Image (cartoon, rainbow, N blue to C red):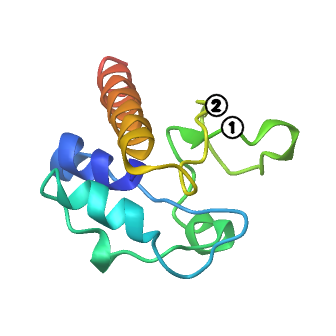
């Protein structure tokens, strides 16, 4: 969802990549539904491993979402941990709350990167 929000809010000037330490190869159905409510089609995405996006670095920022001590290293100018709960097992209302939090965080990050 963070990659989708970066594309939605950042336009053509923002390049965003999403990856995980244990990708399943498919996007969570709840995420597809939650983003469709906002007019974004996640069906065209797939989950990727960190190795699959590392080639696009170095990055201006790498954002992790609550990985704690297990955060992987990626080539980046700055590292940010948002400590966002994994919503995959949440009910729809809580899932959408996390989705909206991610949107706020992405908007704030884009604004901060543009002001540099």
Say above or below: 24 vs 15.
below
Element marked by disc 2: loop
Residue at 34% of width from left, 27% of height from top?
104
Residue 9, label in figure: none
Which one is in front, 38 or 116?
A: 38
Say above or below: 25 vs 47.
below
Q: Gap in Å between the C-alphas at discs 1 and 2? A: 4 Å
In this picture, residue 73 sits left or right of residue 26: right
Q: Residue furthest left?
A: 39
Q: Residue 36: percent from the left, percent from the top?
A: 20, 61
Which one is in front, 76 or 39?
A: 39
Residue at 80% of width from left, 36% of height from top?
68
Residue 64 figure quarter: top right
Residue 44 figure quarter: bottom left
Residue at 61% of width from left, 39% of height from top?
85
**Residue receiving disc 1:** 66
Crowding around mark 2 (Cα neighbors within 10 Å: few <14, some 14 to 19, many 20+) is few
Q: Residue 86: percent from the left, percent from the top?
A: 60, 47
Quarter of the image that includes the C terminus: top left
Residue at 37% of width from left, 20% of height from top?
112
Q: Residue furthest bottom?
A: 25
The reply to whether discs 1 and 2 touch (Cβ–Cβ < 8 Å) is yes
Q: Residue 18: percent from the left, percent from the top?
A: 49, 59
Say above or below: 28 vs 59.
below
Which one is in front, 82 or 17?
A: 82
**Residue receiving disc 2:** 83
Crowding around mark 1 (Cα neighbors within 10 Å: few <14, some 14 to 19, many 20+) is some
In this picture, residue 67 sits left or right of residue 1: right
Q: Residue 62: percent from the left, percent from the top?
A: 58, 42
């Amino acid at each position: 969802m963070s990659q989708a929000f970066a594309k939605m809010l950042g336009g053509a000037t923002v390049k965003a990549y999403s990856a995980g330490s244990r990708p399943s190869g498919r996007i969570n159905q709840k995420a597809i539904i939650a983003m469709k409510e906002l007019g974004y089609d996640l069906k065209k995405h797939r989950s990727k491993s960190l190795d699959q996006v590392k080639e696009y670095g170095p990055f201006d920022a790498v954002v992790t979402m609550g990985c704690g001590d297990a955060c992987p290293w990626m080539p980046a100018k700055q590292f940010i941990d948002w400590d966002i709960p994994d919503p995959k097992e949440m009910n729809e209302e809580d899932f959408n709350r996390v989705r909206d939090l991610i949107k706020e965080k992405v908007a704030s990050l884009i604004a901060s990167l543009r002001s540099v």
